[in-house]
Amino acid sequence: MIQGRDIVVVGQQPWDVAIGSNCKNIALEFSKHNRVLYVNSPLDRITALRNAKDPQVQKRLQVIRGQENGLVNIAPNLWNLYPDRMIESINWIGSQAVFEKLNKVNNKRFANSILRAMHHLQFSNIILFNDNDMFRCFHLKTFLKPAVSVYYSRDYMLAVDYWKKHGEKMEPELIAQSDVCVANSTYLADYCRKYNPHAYYVGQGCELEMFSNYNNPVLPEDMQLIKGPVIGYMGALLGLRLDLNVLVHIATARPDWSIVLVGREDDAFRSSKLHNMTNVHFLGSKPPSVLPQYIHAFDVCLNPQVISEVTIGNYPRKIDEYLAMGKPVVATRTPFMEAVFSEYTYLGTTGEEYVQLIEKALHENAPEKESARKTFAASHTWENSVEAIYKAILSVSLHT
């Protein structure tokens, strides 16, 4: 446990973006025993010009113009900062040296905003927690002079062109200069450990109450005429992340199974042959509140990931959501899935393996297995993840 400290949280996810994020959950957990300043990413000039009418951009411009206070108390021990300086949009610059020079100027502007808020709140001897932002926060260890700097890796960002362009050089440097690195997957912890020996896997919390407490046996209306067994997937249907060939193979090999896909489709899925298969049912995107109702209707849950730079290191939250409802899960085998989930899921790679494992999951399912899955998923809390982060920070022996 770390308590009574001042923690500054920076990163990619502003607090006022509606979607949830690991970093916001972590900040809330930090604030139970520490004072926390959660800093929104600074507004850049191109975003200000392109989205001038956006209410979120307007809010930031008012803060920058001095028309509104950018420091907001949002919960006990938790403040949110809208930076009062704009930064320049520089990622288009081809020269690494020029980019790094201008990026340092941006970092200085950003740091000055944070320092003013820290002074107002009387923050000192801070822990700096950086949520995967390798550019805008690269120099904050120098400018803010934290007692401990923490780099949090939750996605392999270099698989994305925006971050890859300058990040292939800068992220390893940032990892190396950080006092400690923490990651939400074993794959990303191993990646960070290449550059910093103080790199640790800290797991991830999931908000599972609506899944674990679900007890409504009524089937969704659009599933009442679908015959079982039902093999289901819940989530965005993206060709970049999901293996269409595996899904086609399952549907072809077992026409007596109903393949139910719940989520919005991208072009790859909309144009796929799955739409011509009578035992495949696309039910579209659903509000989060009804997702447990659909998972409850599945006999076996799927996560047929494509193995790529984008997916290999990620923590698939949907696995915990499936398991929290006691469902058997068949998923793609990755080093992370093997290290963390192998005891409670069935892991395969090819379409043939998926069919065999689904058959095994249907045959083996039993109340005691369902109970074990629920208990395992329930251990993945933000409290436990933050406890692991605290242990990682304390292990570097830089706290005071």
Image (tube, helix red, strand yellow):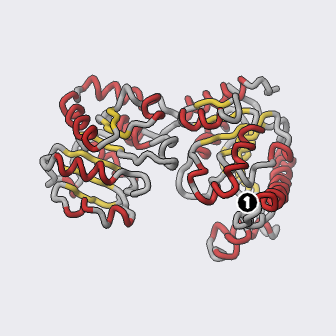
- Residue plotted at (66% across, 34% down): 194
| Residue 80 percent coordinates (x, y) | 70, 52
Amino acid type shown at disc 1 = Pro
In this rendering, position of residue 318 left or right of residue 157: left
Question: In which image quadrant can residue 126 be found?
Answer: top right
Quadrant in which the N terminus is drawn: top right
Viewer-closest of 369 and 99: 99
In this rendering, position of residue 188 left or right of residue 228: right
- Residue plotted at (43% across, 45% down): 307
Image label count: 1
In this rendering, position of residue 36 left or right of residue 325: right
Res. 32 in view: no
In this view, 285 is above or below 228? below
| Residue 250 percent coordinates (x, y) | 23, 47
Viewer-closest of 48 and 269: 269
In this rendering, position of residue 88 left or right of residue 145: left
| Residue 247 percent coordinates (x, y) | 28, 50
Res. 233 in view: yes
Mark 1 is surrounded, within 10 Å at the Cα level, by few (under 14), some (14 to 19) or many (20 or more) other residues, namely many
| Residue 57 percent coordinates (x, y) | 67, 69
What is the secondary structure assignment of the residue under circle 1?
A: loop
In this view, 199 is above or below 41? above
Residue beneath label 1, please? Answer: 42
- Residue plotted at (70% across, 71% down): 46
- Residue plotted at (72% across, 37% down): 150
Quadrant in which the C terminus is drawn: top right
